Image (cartoon, helix red, strand yellow):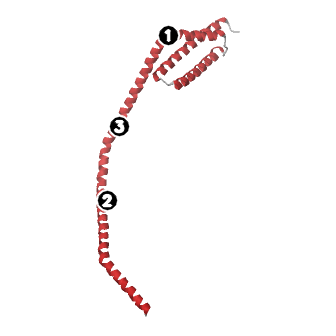
Amino acid sequence: MQPIIEQILIFFGTIFIGSLVGISYDAYWVVRAMVRPRKIGTLIGDIIFWILITALVFVCLILGNWGEVRAYVFLGLIIGFYLEYKKCSGTIRKYIHKVLLFIIKTIKKIIALIKSIIKFIKKVFKIIMMPVHFVIKLIKMPFKFCKKVYRKIRNIVKKSKNKAKKIIKGPFSKLKKKIEKDEDEDEDDEEED
């Protein structure tokens, strides 16, 4: 059996734990109001919140009175939560809201600063790379020119080759046909003999 003084201290400790639960609920409420999740998100958030709060209360009770749960423990938790909710909740929610807004604004400013630094670095890099790109273009110019000249010469050669074939084929194809015809006639004459 615990002495009465120790039980009174545990009772006040549970009132404090109940107040912490209330403050935690206010913080969760503010975050949920800022995020505005849908029904399923709210349901999941509520379940996670109450699991975490239950674990916190359990750990506090284990550390405070070796996990002994008596009526005054529940009474202290309820009184602490009720007092925080009725007397301090509005003020605490306002402060939590202001703190969260400050944190969000600070994070946005940091992100904007990082983006501007990255943008500046990109511009500096572009400026540094301009001469390099210019030199690369200068180096590529003769190769591009040679490539264009090669293609034009190749096209001219193809066209002239085709024209030469047509020119040569024209008169000589008639001659070739005549020679083949004469050879066929000679073979026919030899067969008849």
Q: CB of mark 3 within 8 Å of CB of mark 1?
A: no
- Residue 148 visible in rendering: yes
Q: Residue furthest top?
A: 4
x then y, percent, for residue 93: 47, 15
x then y, percent, for residue 161: 31, 70
- Which residue, given by chain and number where applicable, does mark 2 sit on? 147
Of the residues shown, which amino acid type is indicated by label 2?
A: Lys
x then y, percent, for residue 75: 62, 9
* Residue 73 vs residue 133, the one in the foreground: 73
Quick one: label 2, few (<14), some, or many (20+) residues within 10 Å?
Answer: few
- Of marks 3 and 1, which one's residue comes earlier in the chain? 1
- Which residue, given by chain and number where applicable, does mark 1 sit on? 88
- Which residue, given by chain and number where applicable, does mark 3 sit on? 121
- Distance (Cα) linking label 3 and label 1: 49 Å
Circle 1: element type: helix
Q: Residue at x 33, y 78 (%)?
A: 173
